[in-house]
Amino acid sequence: MIQLTENAIGAVARFIENASKPVVGLRIRVDGGGCSGFQYGMKLEESAAEDDQVVEIGGLKILVDPASQPLLDNVTVDFLDGLEGSGFKFENPNATQSCGCGKSFAC
């Protein structure tokens, strides 16, 4: 199951609160691409797909499509805010390699 840190939960909650449309949850997915073969994607969604896995974490609904589920198993998502910028960081124990930016990986 995917996990979010308290910092990530707070950041997502702020994004949902400031969204211009009603949001049912945050989609986290894996797509082909990036410098290592797979890349992470995140998007606020107005509705869930019928085959989504819906995980509730810290009062948030996280939506994961069936193809992404095995690649996101035991992944921890954090939100970093520092001098070098802010953004989400993924820690994936399934990855055999990842790029320096932390946004893509290989299995």
Image (cartoon, rainbow, N blue to C red):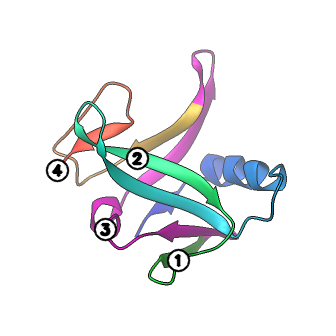
How far from the left and from the top, in percent, is residue 55? 53, 75
Q: Is residue 18 above or below residue 37?
A: below
Q: What residue type is labelled 1?
A: Ala
Q: Name the residue under label 4.
A: 107
Q: Which amino acid does label 2 sit on?
A: Tyr
* Cα–Cα span, label 4 and label 1: 26 Å
- Residue 105 occupies quadrant: top left
The first of marks 1 and 3 along the sequence is 1
Q: Between tags 2 and 1, which lies in front?
A: 1
Q: Name the residue under label 2.
A: 40
Q: What residue type is labelled 4?
A: Cys
* Residue depicted at x 34% and y 63%: 68
* Residue depicted at x 58% and y 41%: 79
Where disc 2 sits, the SS reads: strand
Q: Which amino acid does label 3 sit on?
A: Ala
How far from the left and from the top, in percent, is residue 67? 31, 68
Residues drawn in magenta: 57-86
* Cα–Cα span, label 4 and label 2: 13 Å
Mark sitting on residue 67: 3
